[in-house]
Amino acid sequence: MTPNSISDRESSTKEHEQTSHSIIDDARVDCCIVGGGPAGTVLSLLLARFGINVMLLEAHRDFERDFRGDTLQPSAMEIMAQMGLAEGLLQLPHTKLRSITLRGIGGKVIFSPSFSGLKTDFPYVTVMPQVRFLDFIVAEAKQYPSFQLVLGANVQELIEEDGVIRGVRYRGHGGWHEVRAQVTIGADGRHSRLRELAGLEAIPTSAPMDVLWFR
Ligand SMILES: Cc1cc2nc3c(=O)[nH]c(=O)nc-3n(C[C@H](O)[C@H](O)[C@H](O)COP(=O)(O)OP(=O)(O)OC[C@H]3O[C@@H](n4cnc5c(N)ncnc54)[C@H](O)[C@@H]3O)c2cc1C
């Protein structure tokens, strides 16, 4: 998240106080969220439900990402249930993975955990392409007039005035656009451009598991 007040750090983004680009249009919202992954889309929906004017900016023109995971863990399904979305989500085509069998050389079973013993309403891994999940969340958010989505919006600059982040500038349809917001949130993934622009440092944590992913 990009803090509104950045006066306590060196102003490494001074160059972003003004822009040399000609701005085609500017929007004003309560909250601008950069990045339409799981984090940005779900947060947009939550805020839109509260009537907060939120604009979600996504650099790509759709939610189809090459080389992305397809699984929703039980904990993610529980969050969906808390949001009242689990039932609708499970109406979409998916597979329920109730156990996994890992075999070694010669077909010998090395590891065969089952999810059925988990104390949850969702004792399985829901296998569903991430694009289907994101499209579903965005379709929900679009039901609220307080939600706006801009696809093809590549955020490249912060608007910084008097040491305060006032929004972002993005390259999109026809040129440069400005979004002014009371709160600006970077949900633009692990190589976050917003984090870099804001001069924030990532706090490394160890992942609970490592996954090898093959094409
Ligand atoms: C190969 C692989 C497999 C995975 N498998 C699974 C899985 O099976 N299950 C699971 O739960 N997780 C899986 N993950 C992890 C999961 O994809 C991430 O945890 C999740 O996508 C992080 O969500 P996010 O919203 O924080 O960021 P992201 O999903 O990375 O979304 C960030 C978004 O920001 C946009 N963006 C970036 N820069 C800008 C910019 N300047 N302006 C505008 N938009 C911008 C990007 O286009 C992107 O859409 C996998 C990850 C990988 C790499």
Image (cartoon, rainbow, N blue to C red):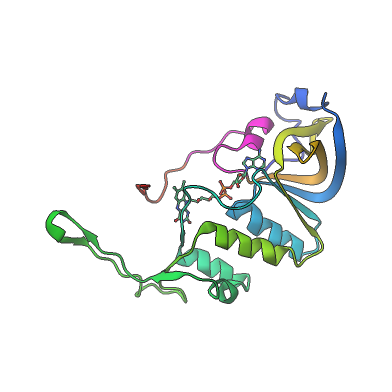
Where is residue 13 shown, x and y percent of the image? 73, 26
Residue at 53 percent of width and 38 percent of height: 203
| 51 relative position to 115: left or right | right
- Which picture quadrant has residue 82? bottom right
Q: Nearer the viewer, residue 72 or 70?
A: 70
Q: Nearer the viewer, residue 126 or 115?
A: 126
Where is residue 53 shown, x and y percent of the image? 81, 56
Q: Is residue 34 magenta?
A: no
**Range of the magenta residues?**
188-204
* Above or below: residue 209 compared with residue 119: above
* Above or below: residue 147 compared with residue 187: below
Q: Farthest left residue? A: 106
Q: Is residue 189 magenta?
A: yes
Residue at 86 percent of width and 37 percent of height: 24
Q: Quadrant of the N terminus?
A: top right
Residue at 69 percent of width and 40 percent of height: 2
Where is residue 211 shown, x and y percent of the image? 36, 49
* Above or below: residue 74 compared with residue 6: below
Where is residue 183 shown, x and y percent of the image? 77, 46
From the image, give the main secondary structure of the stretch colored magenta: loop
- Which picture quadrant has residue 178? top right
| 66 relative position to 59: left or right | left
Q: Nearer the viewer, residue 166 or 169?
A: 169
Residue at 38 percent of width and 47 percent of height: 215
Marks counted in the figure total 0
| 120 relative position to 53: left or right | left
* Above or below: residue 163 compared with residue 207: above
Q: Farthest front residue? A: 174
